[in-house]
Image (cartoon, rainbow, N blue to C red):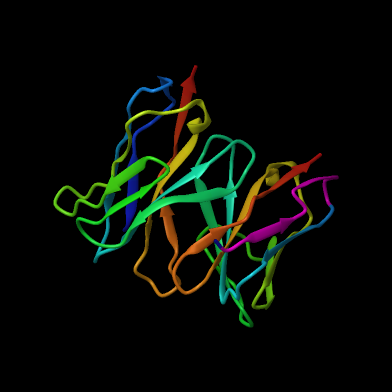
Amino acid sequence: GAVVSQHPSRVICKSGTSVKIECRSLDFQATTMFWYRQFPKQSLMLMATSNEGSKATYEQGVEKDKFLINHASLTLSTLTVTSAHPEDSSFYICSARDKYEQFFGPGTRLTVL
Amino acid sequence: GDSVTQMEGPVTLSEEACLTINCTYTATGYPSLFWYVQYPGEGLQLLLKATKADDKGSNKGFEATYRKETTSFHLEKGSVQVSDSAVYFCALKLTDSWGKLQFGAGTQVVVTP
């Protein structure tokens, strides 16, 4: 099946810094990518839908100025958590959609100290 | 709006026991239905899917049948293994143009030797 990678897999940063997470579709072109956030022992919460070459569509309650999403090419989307704070600590998962289904990345564990 | 309800966990079973995880949905139109599995510290993997009523999805000994009359998509396995210990998510694909997924809360399954 199709492979989606995320980098980094784990990141620890100080409060106030910005963190960038990359999501890549390795063997297919993804016109649409999704970003999810998952708290411990909870379900995935969709943050935003990202389409190549256009602005991301954010879900209600997600701060677009805090979670910057860029989908610069058909194989790469980035999520930047700006001025991160401890409450932003979470597991962030991306997925990439081909014509038929979504494929999920392995996730990025963000810890903000 | 569209939603997915699945049984709460954790579900604890002995090896070779039968597993059933209930999942019901509410949706407009005719969504596609999915089961995803998440192993500790990892992203989601598609386990099986069904795209229309009466379809049966199957993979790795797991099965689920799309029941339109009861709006259900229960996951079953006749004989579980310790390696099946994971969190299982039921999901439906919304009928919007982006193909967004709506997830249930997840059910943790623990299989003991």
Q: Is residue B74 left or right of residue A101?
A: left
Q: Which residues are magenta?
A: A2-16
Residue B8 versus residue A90 in the image, above or below: above
Q: Residue at x 33, y 61 (%)?
A: B32
For the C terminus of chain A, the quadrant is top right
Q: Is residue A61 left or right of residue A16?
A: left
Query: Residue B16 sits in which quadrant?
Result: top left
Residue B98 versus residue A112 in the image, above or below: below
Residue B3 position, x and y percent, is: 33, 52
Residue most extreme to the bottom: A53
Residue B41 versus residue B26 in the image, above or below: above
For the N terminus of chain A, the quadrant is bottom right
Q: Is residue B14 magenta?
A: no
Query: Residue B13 sits in which quadrant?
Result: top left
The number of discs equals 0
Residue B93 position, x and y percent, is: 38, 61
Q: Residue at x 59, y 41 (%)?
A: A39
Q: Is residue B50 left or right of residue A92?
A: left
Residue A60 position, x and y percent, is: 50, 61
Nearest to the observer: residue A35 or residue A31: A31
Residue B63 versus residue A30 in the image, above or below: above
Q: Is residue A14 magenta?
A: yes
Q: Is residue A64 left or right of residue A112?
A: left
Nearest to the observer: residue A63 or residue B112: B112
